[in-house]
Image (cartoon, grey):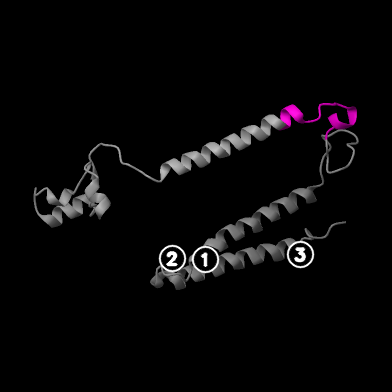
Amino acid sequence: MDSVRKLSCFVDPLAAGDGSLERRRLRLGDQRLQRKGCFVDLPNLPPLFVYGAILVGFVVTNLLLAHTLGPRKHTPVKDMPYESGMDPIGDARQPFDVRFYLVAILFLVFDVELLFLYPWAVSAYSELGIPPELRDTVFGVMLVFMATLALAWVYAWRKGVFRWR
């Protein structure tokens, strides 16, 4: 509260005296401080600026050193496209087998599943997470979600997507 008194650019809207206290609280959303239009002294910013300057200087220095001191001899082997450690043979626009695409799509589906499950698992039973009256409903929704994904897994298994011939 001491820092609030130091800042003369903030006013307490509830101390203005223009109407009932409850009406002003509802209108302002119970915000105690409003900005009048001056700069606020933030003592923690200079160390952040120094850290940012050091970080940018480090990156620029490393880029310049790599550019000036790095090897510059171009050979046909170094100028060849790199493809997983193998020499490229033939045209790069060859058709891929559809199994590559199926595996990629399945990876995306089950990767997105984790994106939905992890936040729910973290916030499910914490005090500030899901409200207690909604926990059972959200748990049921997550069970339906996982059952749908299990059904997709069984379908892909039966179709032979995971068999590599």
Q: Is residue 50 left or right of residue 85?
A: left
Towards the viewer: 89 or 3: 3
**Neighbours of disc 2 within 10 Å: few (<14), some (14-19), many (20+):** some
Residue at (24, 47) in percent of width and height = 6
The residue where tag 2 is placed is 129
| Disc 1: which residue | 122
The kind of residue tagged 1 is: Val
Q: Residue at x 78, y 58 (%)?
A: 161
Q: Is any atom of residue 33 visible in this view?
A: no
Q: Which residues are magenta?
A: 66-81
Q: Which mark is residue 158?
A: 3
Residue 56 in picture, x, y percent from top left = 57, 36
Q: Position of residue 155 (x, y in %)?
A: 71, 63
* Image quadrant assignment for residue 116: bottom right
Residue 93 drawn above or below residue 6: above
Q: Quadrant of the C terminus?
A: bottom right
Q: Amino acid at mark 2?
A: Gly
Q: Are marks 2 and 1 in contact (CB under 8 Å)?
A: yes
- Amino acid type at circle 3 is Arg
Q: Nearer the viewer, mark 2 or mark 3?
A: 2
